[in-house]
Image (cartoon, grey):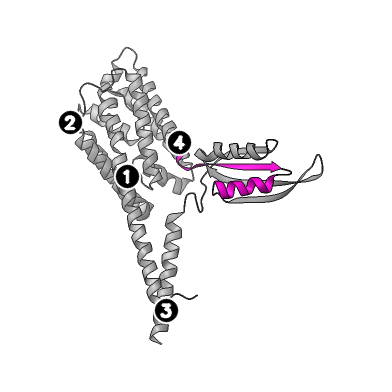
Amino acid sequence: MTKTAEEIKNELIALRKRRVVNDALELITIWFCLLPYAIAINFLMIPHGIVGGGLTGLNEIIYFATDGAIPIWLSNFSINGLLLIVAVIMIGWKFCLRTIWGVVGLTFWFKVLPVLETPMLSDPFMSCVVSGLFCGAALGVTYLNNGSTGGTDIIAMIVNKYKHIALGRVLFACDIFIIGSAYFLPHIRTLEHPVEPLMMGLCFTFMCMLSLDTVMNNARQSIQFFIFSRYAAEDIADAIMYQKHRGVTVLNGTGWYTKKPVKVVTVLVKKFEAKEIMDLIKAIDPNAFVSQTATTGVYGKGFDTILNKKEQQRARELELAFEEAEKQKEN
């Protein structure tokens, strides 16, 4: 059935509204998830005199070197501003728009939150661990919402575009260089054991990466089942589909040892549904052979959706259909 011009127009409007709402929610999430990042730096890292990795670590070095004359929010905004200008020229606006929002948000929180004279936690090592967890989680949520905080991310993107060096290697090299540079700060160089703050900076970076990976992977992690059952494959498939409301695929296989046919049920579920699926399989066929694998990046109905390209393509199709319908209406 061919849609009328009015129906196509209404669908196009609804699609655009949904995109605006999604973008607004993502921007709001990015803004507020950067609050714990600023708390970690201003309440824990700086009061203990510890320098972490990334551009924030460079901002800390400038802060300590000038004895607080150049606040961290000012150096963060200034350096990111210069990097963004370079990025616009070399990479383009597409990457930079969300990055500008992230930079402004982080600068805002650095400006609003004061740098504590007495750290929130008395133990420097525990402060590094907690700060890394806070910063990594904040960055993970930011990336999940298609955002960025700029800094060494921009440097890595530029280097990767022209030199084809892995992003992780560039970021790691930047972190090591920045943390190592902290050795020359007066309050670190004059310590009896000046290497300790550097090791704590590395610990912060490690915890940050660990927290970031955990947030990114858990948010998109699903479980893939391969269920081999000779006599109850159809019953298992029906139970999963009608009781758990998950799509199921049944494959024909052959057990090569016995040379007998066997049905293979494959299904993808969310991580929290895995135990329910296992209980269901055991109740129907306790002798079933089950392979359970963790997967990331599952896209499709019931899981993640590839919003940007898919919705942009759909919007373009609707625009063309609307134009065609309008021409037919005129004729």
Question: CA–CA distance between discs 2 and 4?
Answer: 35 Å
- Pick whichever, 210 or 6, lies toward us: 6
Contact? badges 4 and 3 (CB < 8 Å):
no
Question: CA–CA distance between discs 4 and 3?
Answer: 48 Å
Residue 86 visible in this rendered orientation of the protein = no
- The answer to whether residue 229 is magenta is yes
Q: Earlier in the sequence, mark 1 or mark 4?
A: 1
Please name the amino acid that badge 4 sits on. Asp
Q: Which residue is mark 2?
A: 69
Left of 263 or right of it: where is 278?
left
Task: Give the extent of the magenta segment.
Answer: 218-245
Q: Earlier in the sequence, mark 4 or mark 3?
A: 4
Left of 73 or right of it: where is 261?
right
Q: Which residue is mark 3?
A: 325
- Pick whichever, 322 or 209, lies toward us: 322
Asked which quadrant contains residue 255, the reply is top right
Question: CA–CA distance between discs 2 and 3?
Answer: 64 Å
Residue positioned 32% across, 45% down in the render = 29
Q: Earlier in the sequence, mark 2 or mark 3?
A: 2
- Pick whichever, 143 or 247, lies toward us: 247
Q: Which residue is mark 4?
A: 213
For discs 2 and 3, the disc positioned in front in the rendered view: 3
Asked which quadrant contains residue 58, the reply is top left
Q: Earlier in the sequence, mark 2 or mark 4?
A: 2
In the rendered view, would you say 324 is above or below 16? below
For discs 2 and 4, the disc positioned in front in the rendered view: 4
